[in-house]
Image (cartoon, helix red, strand yellow):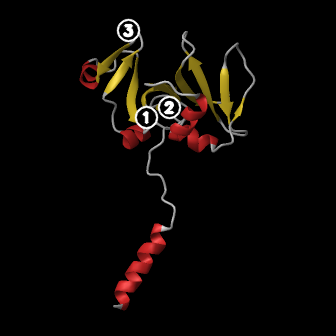
Amino acid sequence: MNAIWLFVLLMVASSDQPQKANESLFRIGMSHQEMAALFGEPQSYLDVDSQLHIPRSDYLQRDGHCFCRPLYTRKTQRNEYEITIFEKIDDSTSRLHPTIRVDEVRFTLDRDMKEEELLADIVEAKQECDGKCVSLPEQFPGDREVTRPGSSTRFSFFYGKDGRLKFMTMFPSK
C-alpha cells in the first residue's frame, strides 16, 4: 500500500514540473549534418534559377549540379510554413573539406498573420526574442527588423505589394 502512495506522490510531483519543448530548432551557423540529424533530409529543394520546387529524387539525379536550397515545412496550430534554408561554405577549419553551414532561414507564411503573432508562433523567434526583441531603425523605407539587444540574430519582415506579410527571415547580425 505504501508503495502505491509513493508512486502516486511521485507522479503528482513530476506532473508539476514544467515540460521542456522537444521541438528542434534551426540555428544560424549549424552545419548541414546537424540540420539533417535534427530534421532529416529535405523532401524537396528550391531551384534558385527556375524558382521551381524539385523533389529530392530529382535533386539526387542532378548530383549537386544545381543551385538549390533545401526546403522543409512546419505546421503549427496557427499557420503552416515553408522553410527555405540559405547555406554558406565555412572553410575556416579546412579549405579542402569545408563545412556547409546555415546562414539564413526564411519562413514563408501560408496564411496572413501580424508580426507579433508570427514571432510568437515560430519557435526559433519565440526562443530568441523571449519577449525582449526591439525594432531596429529602418535602413530602407518599410524595412522592419527586430532583434534582442546583445543577440547575434535578427528577424526581418517582408511584405507583398498587397501589403500583407509574406515571409520572415532569420539571419545573423553583422
| Percent position of residue 22, x then y | 44, 51
Q: Position of residue 147 (x, y in %)?
A: 67, 34
Comparing 155 with 66, the one in front is: 155
Rendering quarter of residue 139: top right
Identified by mark 3, the residue type is: Ser
Q: Which class describes the residues within 10 Å of circle 2: few (<14), some (14-19), or many (20+)? A: many
Horizontal and vertical percent for residue 32?
43, 34
Nearer the observer, 13 or 89 = 13
Secondary element under disc 3, as helix, strand or loop, is loop
Instruction: Tell me the residue that label 2 is attached to.
Output: 102
In the displayed structure, would residue 107 be above or below residue 161?
A: below
Lower position in the chain sequence, tag 2 or tag 3? 3
Mark 3 or 1, nearer chain start: 1
Q: Are marks 1 and 2 in contact (CB under 8 Å)?
A: yes
Mark in front: 3 vs 1? 3
Residue 86 seen in the current view = no
Residue 49, picture quadrant: top left
Give the label on residue 32, or none: 1
Q: Which residue is mark 3?
A: 50
42 left or right of 158 in image: left
Alpha carbons under labels 3 and 1: distance apart: 23 Å
Quarter of the image with the N terminus is bottom left
Q: Which residue is at 67% across, 18% downward?
A: 143
Image coordinates for residue 21, horizontal then vertical, percent: 47, 52
In the image, taking residue 154 as reference, residue 28 lies left or right, namely left
Q: Residue furthest bottom?
A: 1
